[in-house]
Image: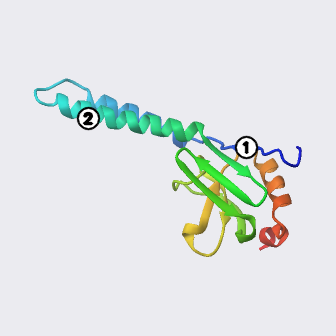
């Protein structure tokens, strides 16, 4: 890869996204069983909310990626975006979590930028080894971080 060329690492999509799609489909079946008098407005509102959730999940599923720029890691997940300066990264570990983050799988890489839990970024690149190799070339103190 050339020096100025920036590579996007797409997120690996785990079982969470298909489960969300099934939940939306199940909710649609619950909302529209048999029309009853006066319930049409409620059904239309519920359908609009479920459509927003469906398109939101689709947007996140197809637009989550990570960029290893010159001075920082950039994580983009649908409408959400964050940056982590390489010099602020204190710990990199692998683990499992289902909390909402920039990772779309349970198995993910935890990138800590301090001791505060809100300073943690979870990522799940589909090309994990390549991502970690390039990250190691970007972070000057990578060996100390990984050996903790």
Which residue appears farthest toward the left when viewing the image?
Answer: 37
**Which residue bears the numbered disc 2?**
45
Q: Secondary structure beneath disc 2?
A: helix
Residue at horizontal 82%, vertical 70%? Answer: 141
Q: Residues within 10 Å of mark 2 (few under 14, many from 20)?
A: few
Q: Of callouts 2 and 1, which one flags the residue occurring earlier in the amino acid sequence?
A: 1
Of residues 98 and 103, which is closer to you in this image? 103
The answer for how far apart the CA atoms under marks 2 and 1 are is 38 Å
Left or right: residue 118 compared with residue 42:
right
Residue at horizontal 60%, vertical 42%? Answer: 14
**Which residue bears the numbered disc 1?**
8
Residue 18 visible at all: no
Query: Residue 68's spot in the image, x, y percent?
Result: 75, 53
Left or right: residue 72 compared with residue 19:
right
Which residue appears farthest toward the top when viewing the image?
Answer: 34
Q: Residues within 10 Å of mark 1 (few under 14, many from 20)?
A: some
- Residue 37 in which image quadrant: top left
Query: Residue 49's spot in the image, x, y percent?
Result: 33, 38
Where 100 sits versus 1, above or below?
Answer: below
Query: Residue 54's spot in the image, x, y percent?
Result: 43, 35
Residue at horizontal 73%, vertical 43%? Answer: 8
Where 52 sits versus 67, above or below?
Answer: above
Q: Secondary structure beneath disc 1?
A: strand
Image quadrant where one finds the C terminus? bottom right
Left or right: residue 45 compared with residue 7:
left
Which residue appears farthest toward the front when viewing the image?
Answer: 4
Q: Which mark is residue 132?
A: none
Residue at horizontal 38%, vertical 33%? Answer: 51
Residue 38 visible at all: yes
């Amino acid at each position: 890869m050339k020096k100025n060329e920036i590579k996007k690492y797409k997120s690996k999509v785990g079982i969470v996204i298909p489960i969300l799609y099934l939940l939306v489909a199940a909710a649609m079946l619950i909302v529209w069983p048999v029309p009853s008098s006066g319930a049409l407005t409620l059904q239309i509102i519920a359908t609009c909310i479920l459509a927003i959730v469906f398109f939101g999940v689709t947007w996140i599923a197809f637009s989550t990626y990570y960029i290893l720029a010159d001075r920082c890691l950039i994580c983009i997940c649908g409408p959400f975006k964050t940056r982590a300066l390489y010099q602020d990264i204190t710990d990199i570990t692998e683990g499992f979590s289902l909390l909402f983050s920039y990772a779309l799988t349970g198995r993910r890489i935890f990138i800590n930028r301090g001791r505060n839990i809100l300073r943690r970024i979870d990522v799940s690149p589909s090309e994990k080894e390549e991502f970690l190799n390039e990250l190691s070339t970007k972070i000057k103190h990578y060996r100390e971080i990984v050996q903790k």
